Structure formats: C-alpha cells, structure tokens
Amino acid sequence: MELTRVDPRAYIKIAVLRGRNEMECHNEFVEALGNNDLPYRTVARWIGKFLQGRVSTSDEQRSRRPLNVQTDLARAVIEQLMDEGR
C-alpha cells in the first residue's frame, strides 16, 4: 500500500490529539513502515505545526513559480538554445 503526502500528516494530527510526543509518533511510523518511514525531523516539524494550531493536513499555497510549465514554450526555448550552441 502506498501513502500519499497527506496520509502521514493525518496520522500525526491524530497522534497529537491523543497526546503522543515526537519520539512515540516516529517510533510508530518506523514500526509500521520499516525503511520507508518519515525522518524524525519531519515528524517533529508537523507535530509542532499542529501544536501551534494548524488544522489542515494538505500543502499550503505558496507564492512561487507555478508547478505547471508551458511545455511547448520550454521545448522551443531549449531547441533554440541547442541550435545556437552548434
């Protein structure tokens, strides 16, 4: 079974509500997922966010370049650069 980015965060949120600390939560991930566990710092960071009042488990909107890239434009620019380099 594969986990999405939101699945571990939802578990961490529930663990915080149950009073689990970073070490307990991380140990449960290691037990459940083996080598595919989350790094301790990631678990601790998300526990801190939930303790500070964060409610959502999904990624927040960021003000940076959009994830979508105009592939036709990118392809044209790359081809032009390659032609100039010849």
Image (cartoon, rainbow, N blue to C red):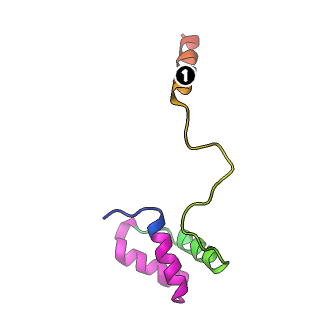
Up-down relation of residue 85 to residue 50 (above or below): above
- Does 21 lie within the magenta span? yes
How many numbered tags mark residues here? 1
Q: Residue furthest left?
A: 1
Residue 41 place in picture, x, y as percent: 56, 70
**Apparent side of residue 16 relative to residue 8 in the rendered image (left or right):** right
Residue 26 place in picture, x, y as percent: 47, 77
The quarter of the picture where the N terminus appears is bottom left
Q: Quadrant location of residue 82?
A: top right
For the point 59% across and 11% down, the residue is 84
Up-down relation of residue 74 to residue 51 (above or below): above
In the image, the segment drawn in magenta is: 8-36
Up-down relation of residue 52 to residue 73 (above or below): below
Residue 12 place in picture, x, y as percent: 50, 77
Q: Residues within 10 Å of mark 1 (few under 14, many from 20)?
A: few
For the point 48% across and 65% down, the residue is 6
Q: Residue furthest bottom?
A: 19
**Apparent side of residue 35 relative to residue 40 in the rendered image (left or right):** left
Residue 83 place in picture, x, y as percent: 54, 12
Viewer-proximal residue among 42 and 57: 57
Q: Main secondary structure of the magenta part?
A: helix
For the point 69% across and 50% down, the residue is 63
Q: Label 1, on which residue?
A: 78
For the point 48% across and 81% down, the residue is 25
Which residue type does callout 1 highlight? Ile
The quarter of the picture where the C terminus appears is top right
| Secondary structure type for disc 1 | helix
